[in-house]
Amino acid sequence: MTRTIPIDDPADPRLADYREVRERDLAGRDGFIAEGQVVLEKLVRGGRHGLRSVLLAEKRVPALAGLLAGLADEVPVYAAGQAVMDAVAGFPIHRGILAAGERRTLDAEALLAGLPRRALVVGLVGIANHDNMGGLFRNAAAFGADAVLLDDSCCDPLYRKAIRVSVGAALTTPFAQAGSAGDLCKLLAQHGFSVVALSPRGAVDLADLSPSARTAALFGAEGPGLPLDLLAGVQSVRIPMAGGFDSLNVATSSGIVLHHLAARAPSWAV
């Protein structure tokens, strides 16, 4: 039988992690909030981050019985009526599924050192939009990237919306902060990665790019793109487009590029 703790008071102190979720997202938090069944499954089964608790609408409990049965005994599962759950979160939680996670950070140096001889890394510079961040992680997972590195101007991949847009990939794909954009590139070079940087003004067409055993693909924010001094020091790559148009959403670009790299080097894990 699924073990749950009934909650009927929105002010219950045990639900502090879930209170006014939107505002607390903006202010930052030491942990993170996962939302929806698929994301909860990734959090529970991925093993990369800890799980503090689960908050469910009562109607969702029976369908999640199998997943909940596998939780550690010390993880509380709270069940509340939909109205109570909405009052706690501060807006309607239509999915009726929230979980409070415990963030576990990785060291960028150690992360790269532990990758296999053949590896694909995604490098992100200045990605400040949470929808784009989520899409980038989703594509990284879909095309088998071994890790994601972020410079210090990127937004948080464990922001609730970024996790949701990534369909939980932000919880399963290893990532680490790597300092400035320059520091990120230096670290990749030190670990034997050939760095390719995406730009509408890239020197090489993507179709002509043959990845090396260790390849890192860098993506910058829409609009400013990657810094010019960074582009000058690495192999720049462009995606050919119809005349008069030179811009793609960064998440879309990453999908095209990572598909190309995966197709040209199908055995990244060898």
Image (cartoon, rainbow, N blue to C red):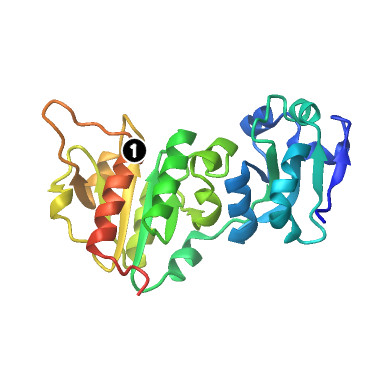
Q: How many marks?
A: 1
Q: Which quarter of the rendering shows the C terminus?
A: bottom left
Residue ID at (82%, 61%): 73
Q: Position of residue 29 (x, y in %)?
A: 68, 40
Image quadrant of residue 215? bottom left
Q: Is residue 100 above or below residue 144?
A: above
- In this view, the residue in front, 30 or 186, is 30
Q: Amino acid at mark 1?
A: Val
Report crowding for label 1: few under 14, some 14 to 19, many 20 or more residues within 10 A (C-alpha).
Answer: many
Residue ID at (80%, 53%): 2
Does the rendering let one see residue 128? no
* 179 horizontally vs 87: left or right: left
The kind of secondary structure element at disc 1 is helix
- In this view, the residue in front, 246 or 36, is 36
* 140 horizontally vs 51: left or right: left
Residue ID at (16%, 35%): 241
Q: Position of residue 193 (x, y in %)?
A: 31, 64
- In this view, the residue in front, 104 or 21, is 21
Q: Which quarter of the rendering shows the N terminus?
A: bottom right
Q: Position of residue 3 (x, y in %)?
A: 83, 53
Image quadrant of residue 45? bottom right
- In this view, the residue in front, 270 or 229, is 270
Question: According to the image, label 1 marks what residue?
Answer: 250
Residue ID at (83%, 48%): 4
Q: Position of residue 111 (x, y in %)?
A: 48, 64
